[in-house]
Amino acid sequence: MRIIVGEGSCGLAAGAGAVYTRLKELLAQGNPGAVLGITGCNGMCFLEPIVDVYENDGTLHRFVKVQEKDADKIYEAVSSGDWSIAQKLAITPEDEEFLNKQTRIALRNCGVIDPENIDDYIAHGGYQAIAKILESGMTQEDVIHEVDVAGLRGRGGAGFPTAFKWRAARDSKPGEDGQKYLICNADEGDPGAFMDRAVIEGDPHSLIEGMLIGAYSIGASVGIVYVRAEYPLAIVRLRKAIEDATARGYLGKNILGSSFSCEIRIKAGAGAFVCGEETALIESLEGKRGMPRLKPPFPAQAGYWHQPSNINNVETYANVAWIINNGGAAFSAMGTENSKGTKVFALSGKIARGGLVEIPMGTTLREVIFGIGGGIRDGKEFKAVQLGGPSGGCLPASKLDTVIDYKQLQATGAIMGSGGMVVMDESTCMVGMARFFLDFTAKESCGKCVPCRLGNKRMLEILDRIVAGKGEQGDIEKLEDLCYAIKDGSLCGLGQTSPNPVLTTIRYFRDELEAHIDGHHCPAGECRELISYSIDKDVCVGCTACARQCPVGAISGTVKNPHEIDPALCIKCGNCKTACRFGAVKVN
């Protein structure tokens, strides 16, 4: 019998480490037939910490939201075989649908294998793809052709055909005494995105194997993973995976007895969003400030140290071994005409079941948000979804039946991006949300080109005025003019896509912008300068809960008598409304 504790970052943050330690203590006292292990995030972040118990016949018992004190119940159930002892911790059939409705390729091993055990990866078919290539004599073109048949496009945001990039890098000749480089972009900087981190933490060998196949295809002998330093667990597990793969002969000289040699090393980035752009990433790798280069030449011709280089992100590489093992046609059988295979999304925000979702292209937004994610939490109404991170766009309820593929999402004004999907409910101010994302991109601009450096700043100033109740007639038109000037004039993808949240807000939520400007009113009741708090004396029971939670003493009143708020002292933090169980606190 195996007891597996989910130790991704989400699980550890929720207390999985303490659960593991307690189970280890209990197992040391007896029950030698049970083996304790770990795994990465299985995507069900909303249920962490998760403990999976596998009986010897493969039967799975999944326990969720497990705390340290609950470990004793699980141990007792394992020891006695009476699973009813821990029944209150068992996953519900409704929550099981979160995984049952997915199709997993990039995430196939996440939450299944021990990410720190290379034998576990091999037992699940690991390194069979690179062995197939080297032992069967597949040529570089054979491999690239299979990826081409699959229709795999880059999962990092732009969606560029992977096979095209690989061919371009293969056909480019390095300079004298130079070599080619294969680079992995793991600089996942979108707010609300954690797909790449989960893959590295939960299945680092799939990244290594995908990179090996890519390196073989383009003729590179060096692979580099550029990963955010804010992902310490991912770096630790990837480093161990590289060491283990080298020790087993899957990395290094003459891999599996062939003439192919390749090493992989890690570069920890400082967390600049612009380094998600491939040429800015290369500049950072070379020890320079992360700023995009003019293109052409493209990295395939002159990339890292001006040698031919190929860059894909983690999710892209995580698909490659599956494609080689199962055939490109099997991958392309899923999805739509111009968007093949599956895509991983990070569901976050006001969603009932938040976490990682992998679905075939062609699935609708409605199915992801309501069918898999369980809809909006706390019984509130869906209002919008932000797709593609700060460079994406906000789509309203009328667009829920939009099919997820590159072309159709782009037609709505949003983008696929790397896969962030932030869900918003009726309490979200869309003007404030546009301002939030624009504030992020304005701060993350490298400053190299004027349209991005100054244009985003000017747009942010206008939105600052609007949410403060100082909007003016003509502000919407000014925002539109700036948006198109920035998109047309910016050097790299950051500036070219940064206006998307503003443009989609104007397109789908113009009435909210006009309410802020014309009526100095925030319909969602979120913008502090445009709201005030009061207490309905007919509803207030004088419980004093609101007064106890007010950090500035703005609420006065005696026990069992109606209270009131001094607007001169109120800082509009909302603590009083949250504390009131009777609905007496009103937002005006």
Image: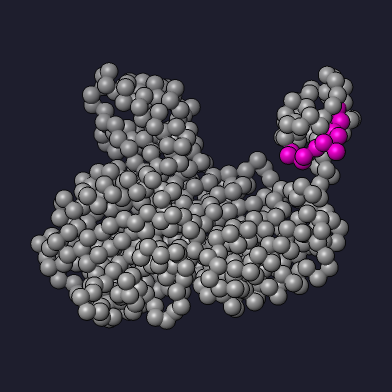
Q: Position of residue 183 (x, y in %)?
A: 33, 65
Using the rendered image of the protein, determine whether residue 360 is visible from the camera's viewpoint.
Answer: no
Q: What residue do we see at 19% from left, 58% from top?
A: 251
Q: Position of residue 306 (x, y in %)?
A: 33, 75
Using the rendered image of the protein, determine whether residue 258 is visible from the camera's viewpoint.
Answer: yes
Which residue occupies the foreground of this view, 558 or 1? 558
Q: What residue do we see at 36% from left, 20% from top?
A: 76
Q: Position of residue 560 (x, y in %)?
A: 84, 19
Region of the chain picked out in magenta, as a range: 563-574
Q: Where is residue 265, by image quadrant?
A: bottom left
Q: Where is residue 179, by image quadrant?
A: bottom left
Left or right: 181, with 458 as reference point: left
Q: Is residue 231 above or below residue 139?
A: above
Which residue occupies the foreground of this view, 515 or 5? 515
Q: Is residue 24 above or below residue 54?
A: above
Q: Where is residue 330, by image quadrant?
A: bottom left
Q: Residue furthest left?
A: 257
Q: Is residue 573 magenta-colored? A: yes
Q: What residue do we see at 32% from left, 22% from top?
A: 25
Check the image and tell me how it is coloured.
Answer: one colour
Q: What residue do we see at 89% from left, 30% from top?
A: 537
Q: Please, what is the dominant secondary structure of the magenta stretch?
A: loop
Count of marks overlaid on the render: 0
Q: Is residue 29 above or below residue 9?
A: above
Q: Is residue 582 magenta-colored? A: no
Please state, as top left, top right, bottom left or bottom right, where the C terminus lies in the image: top right
Q: Residue furthest front?
A: 288
Left or right: 489, with 277 as reference point: right
Q: Position of residue 570 (x, y in %)?
A: 80, 37
